[in-house]
């Protein structure tokens, strides 16, 4: 929407389109508040965004560039009597960005040796080709090793910086016609880049978690589509195993003896209700409790790492609570407790934005707020000055924490970081009878003191990666840099040039490591900020979305304690529009007109999205 | 507040809905009337299809309309060429699909689909199977779909192994599915029949066991596959021992032997000039032939009690004087024409009675409801069930299966343990759960409520304590019969065993003395009349109210019924049919309080000389 047309008065101005901000926006708009929702970025969802492969490369590039010194503009001329300015800053919490490409740049490099081998023919053709590929990967390996050495001083030269447009495409088409399955080249990744939707955060929705409840309650769910995570895996004794957690899994499991099956089922059944026996273990480690339940090593591992997803010394009551939550979530939509949104997690904030827009919220991307106008006397924010120097008054201001200087945040815990890795691989980590599995993989610390890694493997049917590839997300709490934390896991479970020869996992074609601030410690009320300004934190490290939803609800209730948080949106046919009399006997034409009105609004949002994509 | 979206009130919505419904009803009724009048006029055209389609898509359970539709289609078949007919029927199938989407359990729709599939000139069975799979994935217990699927499979000749894989898949996704397990039990014998040359006599007492007849083998499965099935079903009942579908299947796997059909016993009495014959199962008298000294006899067969048209015991009286002379020797043969089997019995000089029978063994008598599998296999099954019992000491299915396995293995050796398990099963009402918790369970999604199901349910199965009592009685009687057979006596004594019911009375044809004292019997059922040789009946200290079965027992002399619940003289009337009754003990029965009882009894039972009241 053109800036000139923006009204100059709103109830709530929200800066940042992350999950918490978007939920807040939808909640306000839904109860009739006038909402202006802005984001400095050219895309929705901030650190919650999902990118196509090419957009991700652009994002990486942006983060490698020197942050441009902000033009400090003096807006004091816009000040009125008794007002002062609080400038907003622009800090980005992404760091230690490292990119590696383990697949061949383009097909031509491989084409010539392949052709010669084909000419030679023979039964060992495949084997020979395999070697040639390894060789080419090895040569790459040297390159990357060099880069790795440099990484402390300067970020490695990323593939994203290489000129993409020049690469000849016909070669890719040629390679596709080849009969044997060939490693997908970087060129192909770029060419099919639009098929990727790569999430910056990696989370799942608990089937009975607060986000699913909110999506259902508010009817926002109608804007999105979900897939069930199809299996839970774990990494143990150097092997990836399926965790039996539903009744059907337990029945079909080949790793468990019948007695173990009974014990596991009995434990899962009995832990749902709190018993005296459980209470006796309060404060003592969950592991101890499980040991005393006569559950063997197998079952203890599954229960601690994959079902409760806690550590061995987590207190029993927490371990049991996590186990119960897992069980309660199971079976609502399928045989695992998790859902994943088709097209990636970045869809979810956008769905809430859409709901906000449907109820009249106004959206502007690439549009920021440069400072707040504060009434000195009341210490309340009266309005904001946007990045184009317009004065917009508002009664409340909600902002993503990244736009506020560190000195003004209040943290319950010192800032922690999350370590993230994104891999594009050529196969599933546990190939099964179906190649369309969505897997949640828990990886307990592979060395003492190391982080517990949560891994999500997405298949092409989730619309997050191109056919023939899998998209793997790894997340853990940072100990060192993302590379230090996660590359040991990656090299063990996947084939990379650094892996030992005996590693048989899928090959990594491309991977990205980075660190991101863990938003879980932030308080919604800032330090030394006006009382009607609220902060939304970035993504946290937990698997679910509880933190962001809770935060959004608390902000909403602080501002409008009397109002319902995200009540169900009415069906379009039940909405009465201006000009329609309250009597239901009015002609159908009028109603249709009304519907059209809503459709137009929705179209507006869509156009906004499309324009965003067009720019990419 | 400004800007808020206005929404119609519920009352407004209701009103709109009501009006819409009214409108719909009007349209529906008009279409129905049009339809009926068309049918009356005998119009069978596309218009008829259209109008019935319109009605049926909103109400697929309107049988008359389906009939009209079928009439129309059959008519169109005669006037169109094959391609057109194919097209019409294909359209019919997709219309049916939409009906099934609305109501996947509509009898009319499924029936019509079966009809159409049968008449389709070029049927596409793959599509039909696909439809069934889709339907079953939504509801794996939709029996309409199961029925239809059976038809499709039969018509299209799907290979049996594919069908077995199909049940594998369904059981894998949810093993609480009787249909799948049952289907498996019909497929396995086809796919893995027991190899006929394999000799499978039970190792114990192998010599005495006659080879099973070919019919009894037709539904058996080869051992290799059986072991796999045992493993599969064990996975199921260890995962969820409260799910009965797996246990039922297990019972089927374990118990597949049928008893051989023979004449088990024949008894000849010189005094009564009577022949009594016992069969291995209840039969009717047609096709029985008695041959005396090479001469077929014209005799009238009757069951022991007028109530039985079908009975395992039949008797006939010979013409007076035929065998009454003690100095004559006679050879008698009973032919069971239907089964081409017979039994001979010689009545030697100087003997007043004679009988002929196989020396009965537990194998023949009572193993039939559990497997004739190798003992080692049953032994290992018993082990795994015992393993489960250690984990789930109160699971009724597990206990019951253990009992059955023990009986199959060694009924007398395991008698003590069997009784202990019965006791556990009958122990009841130790702890009931609060009602609200039960309701909570009910409100949860069905497939996963098992996690929330209370494991602390203490009563094992109080609702079926009577069933267990009867079953236990049956087993005790079987054991006693075996003991009697081994001791080769004609005395049957089973006192103080908490019997609640009597059974296997056909096995007691030769018994002269029976002692049923101190049990929990309520009656002597009509089957009791099978004890044709009975002389002394002891049944003190029971709760017997009814003596229906003490009926025409020719040798009965003494009846001891102390401390029972016989309350009226009418209850004693059956005794009047026993000609030799001399001694009757009725002490401790309510009937003794009846006024003038002694005189009445003397009138009723003139033969009784020793009456204790």
Image (cartoon, rainbow, N blue to C red):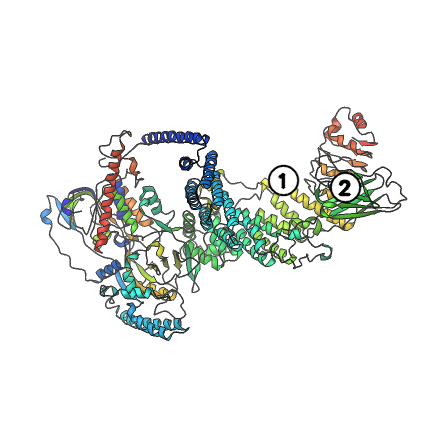
Specify which label sits upstream in the sequence, 1 or 2: 1
Residue B466 shows which numbered tag?
Answer: 1
> Given the current orientation, which residue lies at the most extreme bottom position?
A120
> Mark 1 belongs to which subunit?
B
> Mark 2 belongs to which subunit?
B
Q: Is mark 1 on a helix, strand or loop?
A: helix
Counting labels gives 2
> Mark 2 highlights which residue?
B514
> Given the current orientation, which residue lies at the most extreme top position?
B595
Marks 2 and 1: in contact by CB < 8 Å?
Answer: no
Residue A449 visible to an observer of this rendering: yes
Disc 1 from disc 2: Cα separation = 24 Å
**Number of other residues with Cα within 10 Å of mark 2, as a class: few under 14, some 14 to 19, many 20 or more:** many
> A80 and A2: which one is in front?
A2
- Same subunit, labels 1 and 2: the answer reads yes
As drawn, B214 above or below B586: below
Residue B145 visible to an observer of this rendering: no
> A447 and A40: which one is in front?
A40
Q: Position of residue B499 (x, y in %)?
A: 69, 41
In this rendering, position of residue A315 left or right of residue A43? right
As drawn, A420 above or below A384: below
In the rendered image, which quarter contains the C terminus of chain B?
A: top right
Residue B102 shows which numbered tag?
Answer: none
Q: Where is residue B161 in the image (x, y as percent from the top left)?
A: 53, 55
Q: What element carries label 2?
A: strand
Q: Position of residue A416 (x, y in %)?
A: 29, 57
**Number of other residues with Cα within 10 Å of mark 1, as a class: few under 14, some 14 to 19, many 20 or more:** few
In the rendered image, which quarter contains the N terminus of chain B?
A: top left
In this rendering, position of residue B188 left or right of residue A91? right
In this rendering, position of residue A168 left or right of residue B125? left
Q: Position of residue B258 (x, y in %)?
A: 66, 49
């Amino acid at each position: 929407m053109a800036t000139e047309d923006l009204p100059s008065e709103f109830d709530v101005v929200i800066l940042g389109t992350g999950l918490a901000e978007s939920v807040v926006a939808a909640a306000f708009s839904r109860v009739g508040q006038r909402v202006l929702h802005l984001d400095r970025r050219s895309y929705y969802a901030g650190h919650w965004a999902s990118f196509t492969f090419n957009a991700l490369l652009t994002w990486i590039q942006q983060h490698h560039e020197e942050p441009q010194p902000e033009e400090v503009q003096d807006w004091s001329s816009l000040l009125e009597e008794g007002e002062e300015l609080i400038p907003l800053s622009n800090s980005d919490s992404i760091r230690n960005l490292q990119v590696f490409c383990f697949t061949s740049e383009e097909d031509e490099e491989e084409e010539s040796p392949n052709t010669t081998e084909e000419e030679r023919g023979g039964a060992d053709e495949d084997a020979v080709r395999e070697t040639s590929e390894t060789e080419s990967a090895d040569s790459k390996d040297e390159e990357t090793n060099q880069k790795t050495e440099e990484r402390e001083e300067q970020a490695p030269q990323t593939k994203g910086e290489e000129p993409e447009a020049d690469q000849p495409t016909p070669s890719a088409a040629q390679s596709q016609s080849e009969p044997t399955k060939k490693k997908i080249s970087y060129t192909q990744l770029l060419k099919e880049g639009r098929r990727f939707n790569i999430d910056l955060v990696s989370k799942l929705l608990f089937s009975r978690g607060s986000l699913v409840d909110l999506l259902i309650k508010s009817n926002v769910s109608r804007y999105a589509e979900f897939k069930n995570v199809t299996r839970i895996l774990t990494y143990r004794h150097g092997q990836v195993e399926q965790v039996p957690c539903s009744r059907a899994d337990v029945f079909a499991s080949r790793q468990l003896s019948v007695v173990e099956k009974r014990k596991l089922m009995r434990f899962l059944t009995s832990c749902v209700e709190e018993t005296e026996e459980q209470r006796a273990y309060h404060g003592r480690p969950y592991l101890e409790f499980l040991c005393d339940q006569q559950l063997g090593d197998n079952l203890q591992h599954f229960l601690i790492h994959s079902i409760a997803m806690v550590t061995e010394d987590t207190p029993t009551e927490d371990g049991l609570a996590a186990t119960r939550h897992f069980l309660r979530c199971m079976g609502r939509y399928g045989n695992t407790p998790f859902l994943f949104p088709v097209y990636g997690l970045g869809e979810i904030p956008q769905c809430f934005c859409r709901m906000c827009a449907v109820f009249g919220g106004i959206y502007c991307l690439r549009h920021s707020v440069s400072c707040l106008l504060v009434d000195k006397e009341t210490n309340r924010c009266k309005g904001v000055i946007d990045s184009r120097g317009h004065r917009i008054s508002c009664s409340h201001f909600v902002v993503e924490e990244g736009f506020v200087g560190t000195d003004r945040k209040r943290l319950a815990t010192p800032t922690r970081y999350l370590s993230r890795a994104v891999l594009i691989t050529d196969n599933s980590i546990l190939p099964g009878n179906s190649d369309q599995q969505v897997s949640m993989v828990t990886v307990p610390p592979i060395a003492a003191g190391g982080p517990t890694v949560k891994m999500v493997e997405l298949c092409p049917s989730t619309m997050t990666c191109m056919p023939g590839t899998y998209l793997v997300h790894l997340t853990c709490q940072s100990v060192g840099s993302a590379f230090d934390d996660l590359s040991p896991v990656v090299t063990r479970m996947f084939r990379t040039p650094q892996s030992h020869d005996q590693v048989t996992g899928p090959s990594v074609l491309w991977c990205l490591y980075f660190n991101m601030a863990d938003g879980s410690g932030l308080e919604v009320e800032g330090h030394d900020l006006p009382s009607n300004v609220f902060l939304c934190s970035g993504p946290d490290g937990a698997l679910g979305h509880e933190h962001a939803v809770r935060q959004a609800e608390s902000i909403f209730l602080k501002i409008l304690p009397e109002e319902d948080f995200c009540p169900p949106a009415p069906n379009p046919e039940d909405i009465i529009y201006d000009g329609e009399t309250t009597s239901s006997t009015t002609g159908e034409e009028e109603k249709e007109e009304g519907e059209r009105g809503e459709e137009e609004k929705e179209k507006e949002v869509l156009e906004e999205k499309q324009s965003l994509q067009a720019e990419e | 507040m400004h800007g808020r979206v206005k929404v119609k009130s519920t009352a407004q919505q209701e009103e709109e809905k009501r009006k819409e419904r009214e409108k719909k009803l009007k349209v529906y009724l008009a279409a129905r009337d049009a339809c009926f009048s068309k049918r009356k006029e005998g119009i069978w055209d596309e218009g008829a299809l259209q109008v019935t389609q319109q009605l049926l898509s909103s109400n697929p359970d309107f049988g008359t309309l389906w009939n009209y539709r079928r009439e129309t289609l059959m008519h169109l078949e005669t006037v169109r060429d094959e391609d057109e007919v194919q097209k019409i029927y294909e359209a019919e199938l997709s219309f049916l699909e939409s009906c099934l989407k609305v109501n996947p359990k509509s009898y009319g729709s499924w029936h019509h689909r079966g009809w159409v599939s049968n008449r389709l000139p070029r049927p596409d069975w793959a599509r039909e199977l696909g439809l069934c799979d889709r339907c079953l994935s939504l509801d794996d217990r939709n029996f309409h779909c199961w029925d239809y699927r059976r038809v499709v499979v039969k018509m299209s000749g799907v290979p049996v192994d594919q069908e077995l894989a199909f049940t594998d898949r369904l059981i894998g996704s949810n093993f609480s599915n009787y249909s799948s397990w049952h289907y498996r039990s019909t497929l396995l014998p086809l796919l893995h029949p027991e190899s006929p040359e394999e000799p499978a006599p039970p190792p114990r007492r192998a010599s005495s066991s006659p080879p099973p007849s070919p019919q009894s083998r037709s539904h058996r499965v080869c051992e290799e596959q059986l072991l796999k099935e045992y493993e599969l079903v064990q996975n199921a009942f260890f995962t969820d021992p409260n799910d009965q579908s797996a246990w039922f299947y297990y019972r089927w796997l374990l118990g597949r032997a049928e008893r051989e059909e023979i004449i088990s016993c024949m008894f000849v009495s010189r005094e009564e000039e009577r022949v009594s014959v016992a069969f291995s199962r209840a039969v009717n008298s047609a096709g029985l032939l008695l041959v005396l000294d090479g001469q077929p006899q014209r005799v009238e067969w009757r069951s022991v009690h007028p109530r039985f048209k079908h009975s395992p015991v039949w008797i006939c009286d010979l013409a007076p004087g035929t065998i009454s002379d003690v100095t004559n020797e006679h050879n008698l043969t009973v032919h069971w024409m239907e089964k081409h089997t017979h039994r001979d019995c010689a009545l030697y000089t100087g003997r007043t009675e004679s009988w002929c029978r196989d020396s009965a063994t537990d194998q023949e008598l009572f193993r039939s409801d559990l497997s004739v599998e190798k003992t080692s296999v049953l032994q290992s099954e018993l082990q795994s069930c015992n393993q489960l019992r250690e984990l789930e000491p109160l699971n009724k299915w597990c206990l019951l299966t253990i009992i059955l396995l023990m009986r199959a293995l060694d009924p007398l050796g395991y008698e003590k343990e069997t009784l202990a398990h019965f006791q556990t099963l009958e122990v009841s009402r130790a702890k009931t759960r609060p009602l609200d918790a039960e309701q909570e369970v009910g409100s949860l999604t069905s497939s996963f409520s098992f996690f929330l199901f209370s494991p602390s349910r203490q009563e094992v199965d109080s609702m079926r304590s009577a069933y267990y009592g009867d079953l236990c009685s049956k087993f005790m009687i079987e054991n006693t019969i075996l003991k009697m057979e081994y001791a080769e006596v004609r005395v049957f004594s089973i006192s103080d065993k908490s019997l609640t019911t009597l059974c296997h009375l056909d096995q007691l044809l030769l018994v002269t003395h029976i002692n049923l004292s101190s049990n929990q019997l309520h009656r002597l059922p009509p089957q009791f009349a099978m004890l044709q040789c009975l002389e002394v009946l002891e049944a003190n200290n029971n709760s017997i109210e009814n003596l229906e079965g003490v009926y025409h027992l020719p040798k009965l002399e003494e009846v001891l019924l102390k401390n029972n619940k016989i309350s009226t003289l009418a209850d004693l009337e059956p005794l009047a049919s026993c000609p030799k009754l001399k001694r009757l003990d009725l002490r401790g029965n309510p009937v003794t309080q009846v006024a003038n009882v002694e005189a009445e009894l003397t009138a009723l039972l003139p033969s009784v000389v020793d009456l204790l009241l």
